[in-house]
Amino acid sequence: MSLSLALMLLAVAWLAFSNGANDNFKGVATLFASRTTSYQSAINWAMITTLAGSIAALLLGTALIKAFSGKGLVEAQVLADRNFLLSVTLAAASTVYLATRIGFPISTTHAIVGGLVGAGLIAPGGVELLLLGSRFALPLLIAPLLAVALTLGLYALFVRARKALGVDRETCVCIGTKEHVVALNAPPLHPVISDNGTLSMQSACGTQNVTTDLKLSMGEEPECRQRYDGKVAGINAEKILNVLHFTTAGTVGFARGLQDTAKITGLLVGAGVVALSDPTSLIWGIVLVGVCMAAGGYFAAGKIADTLGNKIADMNAGQGFTANLVTSILVTGSALFGWGVSTTHCSVGGLFGIGIANGSGHWQMIKQIILAWLITLPVAASIAFVIFFILQRL
């Protein structure tokens, strides 16, 4: 194995790992944000569904693999130079990894496009900017705006449907006790309840009073969340909603795995490491990307989960389902038709929409995320420019 081949494989593995860490949780973010399930259950579901999508890329991801191989965007002789796509891959991986460490959800697609632009600036013949804009930049711009609009529209429709079906939204009240544990170096104690209901513990050495206080909390504690009371077709509305919510989360994970595995594998195809005409090489290329993506999502998604689950908008299960349904529609459509939309922009756009709809948007964080989106392309482009410039002179 040549050094350039080994470096390309390592760069792709790093990009896939970083992609998984930044993107895998986006499909299940609303499950966690609405407290429908725990972090561990959410991350497990994300890993399973994303890995399934990666496997499906063997059959359904050909269009995106071709799109991200670089063919048509740059001259054929540029693609023949493995240093070009190595620079693009390292730049995209560095950008996504840095954002993940900071806790900002960004677009791997955007990072790859930025890498193509940056390296293309000093490549012979440059980059076909018009094709780049129509194939990738336009969908990236439209996706978050469309996600916000669809979320607002569907949310209003679902609220009316819920009321028409007679399903009520309840805010739970959590009542518990504060236990006072008394440690005494004394003979055995036994409980005694006096005539006025006071609890005390008595022993041969005397009496120790024990107090218990009721604790009441409304909507503030993580274990307290809004629930739905009512039935639809004789089935509990809350159970139906949870099944649908998990289904849409799984759909997003599957479609994202399909789409991003194809995108990253496309870099291997463009560099000549993997050939579409060679099923064996295509299989191990997709397996490499899928496994690294699943590992990144499982082991390194903590900061992204905190941002998506706690720092963008507050929501209940119904609102989370609405945002996730929009994400699943957009991401699945993108995967089926070979569009270059970003799961990040669709998912976070849906969360923005809920923040607008229920007035809970954390706007300072939302502004920071939008700024991170705006600088993703120039940051990746700058890194790719520098790496390709150096590699050309080695």
Image (tube, rainbow, N blue to C red):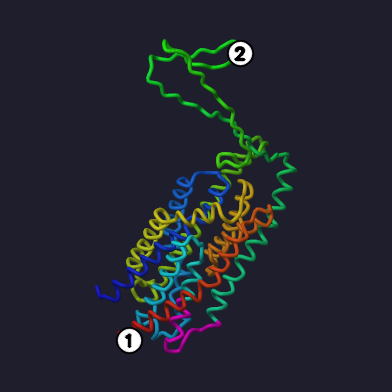
Name the residue rendered at 35%, 62% in the picture: 288
Report which quarter residue 223 is drawn in: top right
Residue furthest left as drawn: 1
Name the residue at 55% across, 24% down: 212
Q: Which sits in the foreground, 12 or 338?
A: 12
Q: Residue 118 magenta-drawn?
A: yes
Indicate the secondary structure of the residue bearing disc 1.
loop
x 47%, y 52%: residue: 46
Q: Which mark is residue 366?
A: none
Instruction: Assign the N terminus to one quadrant of the image.
Output: bottom left
Q: Amino acid at mark 2?
A: Asn
Q: Quick check: 392 above or below 282?
A: below
Image quarter (top left, top right, bottom left or bottom right) of the C terminus: bottom left
Secondary-structure class at tag 2: loop
Q: Estimate the x, y position of residue 321 in percent, counting from the top left.
A: 60, 50
Label placed on residue 393? 1
- Write down the residue under mark 2: 196
Q: Work out whether 111 lies above or below 344.
A: below
Q: Is residue 330 above or below residue 185?
A: below
For badge 1, the amino acid type reads: Arg
Q: Which residues are magenta?
A: 115-130
> Quick one: label 2, few (<14), some, or many (20+) residues within 10 Å?
few
Residue 39 place in picture, x, y as percent: 48, 47
| Lower sequence index among marks 1 and 2 | 2
Q: CA distance from mark 1 to mark 2?
A: 90 Å
